[in-house]
Image (cartoon, rainbow, N blue to C red):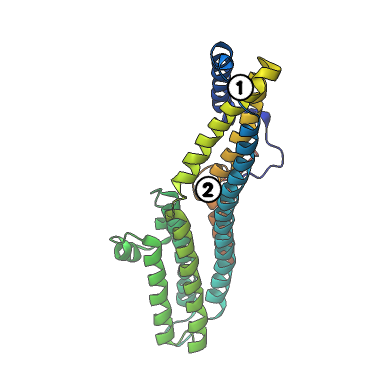
Amino acid sequence: MIITQNIRLGRIVRGTWKNTIMIAFTCSMTYFLYWYFIQYHFEMPAIVPTILGTALAFFIGFNNNQAYDRWWEARKVWGVLVNSSRTWARNIILLPTATEQIKGQHLQLMKEYTVKRHIAFLYALKEKLRGSSTGEYKKYLIQSDLDIIKGESNKHNAILSLQTMELKSWRRDGLIDGFEFLELNAEITRFCDEMGKSERIKNTVFPTTYNYYTKMFIWLFNIAFTLAVAPTVGWRAIIFGTIVGYVFHTIHFIGQAIINPFEPIPTGIPLDQITRTIEINLLEMIREEHIPAPVSPINDEYVM
């Protein structure tokens, strides 16, 4: 996610120079085709690029709105996970009460591990959404839990099942009462809901026809605009066509850059930062000695 208010010119150039050259080349070829051939047969009516440009503006605006809706929904989902994770850790720490069989250091270790297992859930979910296999979640799970979920394709869902099993044992041993069990289980249900929303966004492909036809129509508009202004401004039609084409292509690119919010790109949701923030918060709550450092911005421009 981009965190700076001012984007460096170098980054803009690096991200658009190839497309700009292609636009300039297209406008140049269009102008020379007009100069040596088309002008002797017909002139492009100005109404054509006018209507096409207006239609494209609405179409690109619709695409970008839908892309931002996906991005913003993904951010809200992980905002809920942040708040619910803190609530989960607080309840795990404060609600269970000691019994004759489970008390003192034993109870404290059970609480701490249940909180750490939740951190493992978040890292497993992040890996699934990012399509990576770093195995960061493994450092927060004991070997017996790793053996249980080893054959599961959906590791994060399997970890939630382990949490539910843990709550059932706590209820059976008298560490929590029925009401507290329902409260804690409701948090697990909420985690499952947000997990499902994330997976839906990840697995629902934005219709490729929108992207394909939008790009095709932008190039068509670029050609039509250059042909329409060439009789009036001459070779300068190449410059004007390049500028106008750059604007349309860049606006379209902005929407495409956020259409897959979980991708590890500067415009995506900063899952690394969010999971690390939750990790730090939860480890501090259980008084862990070794706390990882926050995720640092890259070039002071964005966080992943």
Give the structural element (helix, strand or loop) at label 2. loop
In this view, which residue lies farthest toward the top?
36
Q: Is residue 170 above or below residue 233?
A: below
**247 sits to left or right of 278:** right
- Of labels 2 and 1, the one closer to you: 1
Judge by depth and name the residue closer to the eye, 239 or 36: 36
What's the amino acid at mark 2? Ile
**298 sits to left or right of 215:** right
Let me know if residue 299 appears in the view: no
Q: Residues within 10 Å of mark 1 (few under 14, many from 20)?
A: some
What's the amino acid at mark 1? Glu
Judge by depth and name the residue closer to the eye, 73 or 206: 206
Residue drawn at the location 31% of the way across and 62% of the way down: 152
- Disc ID at residue 259: 2
Give the structural element (helix, strand or loop) at label 1. loop
Residue 34 percent location from the top left of the image:
57, 16
Residue 122 percent location from the top left of the image:
48, 60
Q: Is residue 88 above or below residue 153?
A: below
Residue underneath mark 1 = 43
**126 sits to left or right of 285:** left
Res. 47 image quadrant: top right
Residue 19 percent location from the top left of the image:
55, 27
Residue drawn at the location 38% of the way across and 76% of the way down: 165
Residue 274 percent location from the top left of the image:
57, 55
Let me know if residue 197 appears in the view: yes
- Disc ID at residue 162: none
Q: CA distance from mark 2 to mark 1?
A: 39 Å
Q: Residues within 10 Å of mark 2 (few under 14, many from 20)?
A: many
Residue drawn at the location 50% of the way across and 77% of the way down: 186
Q: Is residue 25 above or below residue 249?
A: above
